[in-house]
Amino acid sequence: MSSLRYAESIVVARSPEALYDMVSDVTRMGEWSPVCVACWWDDGGVAQPGAWFTGRNELPERTWETRSQVVAADRGREFAFVVGGSRVRWGYTFAAVDGGTLVTESWEFLPDGIASFQHRYGEDAPAQIADRTEAAHQGIPVTLAAIKKAAESSTP
């Protein structure tokens, strides 16, 4: 099994605050994610630690929804959430650099996520985990490129 953590970065010609504002608006996630097609805040939530949102994901072979909890919301620095509250952590960090902001997207399969997959899939769990890991490795650069395109094509 490959690493259960992965991150990539890209420089975007916008401020850390502008990029944070884009990414922390989870209702826009479907604009750049290759798997997540829509998100909405649960119970009128906003981008703050403890808030929950639901996301709808689609692949050719299946569609599913997940609930995620915001675990970091520091404008201009970091936005992160954990799927299922304890299973998979997705995060974005923002650092000012020459030419804009270095945006890093990270992904980590957490111990509760591994245990959940082992319970749900049994002997097939390693293959299912590997499949999700590969999807993250392929999806992160696609997501970052789409964020860059969206951010740089909008007015500052």
Image (cartoon, helix red, strand yellow):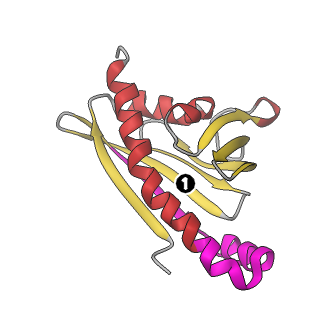
Q: Residue at x 35, y 55 (%)?
A: 8
Q: Height in image: 71 above or below 108?
A: above
From the viewer's perspective, tell me whether residue 118 is left or right of residue 29: right
The residue pinned by badge 1 equals 90
Look at the image and say whether residue 54 sits in the magenta stretch. no
Q: For the view shown, which residue lies furthest in the top direction?
A: 155
Spot the residue most to the right.
Answer: 43
Q: Amino acid at mark 1?
A: Trp
The crowding category of the residue bearing disc 1, from other C-alpha atoms within 10 Å (few below 14, some 14 to 19, many at least 20), is many
Residue 141 location (% of width, % of height): 38, 49
Q: Residue at x 63, y 48 (%)?
A: 60
Say whether residue 117 is magenta. Answer: yes
Q: Position of residue 85 (x, y in %)?
A: 72, 58
Specify start and end residues of the magenta stretch as a single range.
103-129
In the foreground, 116 or 86: 116
Q: Residue at x 52, y 67 (%)?
A: 133
